[in-house]
Amino acid sequence: MQDSRKREIRIKADSFREKCKISRYGIIDLFKECERSGYKLLRYPLGENADLGFTVKKDNDIVIFTNSCSRLSREIFTLAHEIGHVILHLEDMTSFIDDNVTINGRSTDEKEQEANYFAACLLMPSDDVDRFIDLEIQNFHEKGLSAMDIARIMSEFNVSFDMVLNRLESLDVIDSNQKLCLDNEKIEKKVGNLLRSVGGNARLNVPSNEIDIPYEYIDYAIYNYNHNAVPKETLERVLACYQLSIEDVSDKIVEYSDDDDDDLDNLIGGLDD
Ligand SMILES: [Zn+2]
C-alpha cells in the first residue's frame, strides 16, 4: 500500500474515531458506535466455521453483520474491518464477505488489506498506543513489555492479544523476536489467565454468542428457516428476542424442498424479503 493511501486511510479512521466514545485510550463500545453512525448491525452466532462478517449496501441502508461465535475481541476487529469497507469501498462495491483469510491479513486483495489497516488505525491509533505505553507501563525502557502488559493493552483497546502484537510490531514498538517471545508466553500462560491477573476484561477472550437483530430482520430469520439454513431452535431464539413464538409467524413459514440455500448469497438475498 502506498504511503499516500495509508495516510488517507488514517485520516478517515481518525475522523470516524473522533465521533466515538473513548475511555482513556480505547473505543468503549464499537457496536454502539456502529449503530449510532446509522448502520444496521446484525450480530448472530452463525457457527465457528462460518464466515466472520459481511457488509452489504441495500438501497439507502448499510447492513453490517458479525458472527458472534468468534471471540469478542475478534468480533470487534471484524466489525472495525467492515466499517473500513463501508467508509473506504462502498462507493463502487455493493458487498463484502469476510472469512479467516481476509480478516487475518492473508488475502492479497488490496481492499482487504486496506480494511485491515483501517481497523488497526481505528482501534489502536499510534498516538494512543504510545501514550498508553508511556503512562501506563512501568519501566518500559528498561524491561520492555511482558505478556501481562499485552493483556493490559488488550483490555484497554478491546482487541485480541494477537492484534496487539501485530500492531506493536508494525508500529516498531517491538521487533519480530520480542513478538515471538510474547507469543510463547501467551501460549504458556493463556490469555484468559493473563487478563484475569491484570484485572482486565476476560469477556474479550470468549464468544459473546450475542443475538442482535433489528426488528425488521425477523423476516430474514424466517427466510433462512424456510430455506433450511437455520434450525427451528434458532428461529425460536430470534423470535424470543421480540417475545414472539413460531405460532405468531406461522403464516410466513413455508416448506421448501431445495437444500442448496444455505450459502451466504442467499443469506444476504434474504435481507431483501
Ligand atoms: Zn473484508
Image (cartoon, rainbow, N blue to C red):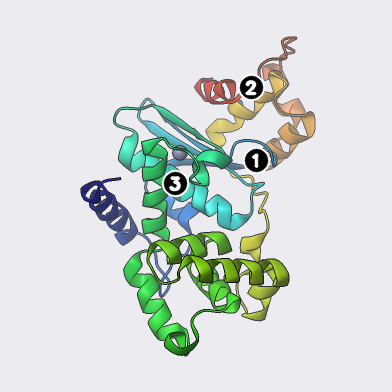
Looking at marks 1 and 2 on the same chain, the residue that comes earlier in the sequence is marked by 2
Residue underneath mark 2: 223
Q: Quadrant of residue 150?
A: bottom right
Looking at marks 1 and 3 on the same chain, the residue that comes earlier in the sequence is marked by 3
| Residue at left offset 51%, top offset 79% | 145
96 lies above or below 42: above
Please name which of the two marks, 1 or 3, marks the residue nearer to the observer: 3
Asked whether residue 36 is in view, the answer is: no
Residue underneath mark 1: 242
- Amino acid carrying label 3: it is His
| Residue at left offset 70%, top offset 39% | 47
| Image quarter where ligand 1 lies | top left
Q: Nearer the viewer, residue 247 or 135?
A: 135
Secondary structure, mark 3, is helix
Secondary structure, mark 2, is helix
Is label 3's Cβ within 8 Å of ligand 1? Answer: yes
Q: Quadrant of the C terminus?
A: top right
Asked whether residue 232 is in view, the answer is: yes
Crowding at label 2, few (<14), some or many (≥20) Cα neighbours within 10 Å? Answer: many
Q: Horizontally, is 148 left or right of 144 in the view?
A: right
Crowding at label 3, few (<14), some or many (≥20) Cα neighbours within 10 Å? Answer: many
Q: Quadrant of residue 39?
A: top left
- Amino acid carrying label 1: it is Tyr
- Residue 244 is situated, as x and y percent measured from the top left of the image, at 70, 36
261 lies above or below 204: above
Please name which of the two marks, 3 or 2, marks the residue nearer to the observer: 3
Q: Quadrant of residue 23?
A: bottom left
Please name which of the two marks, 1 or 2, marks the residue nearer to the observer: 2
Residue underneath mark 3: 81
Secondary structure, mark 1, is loop
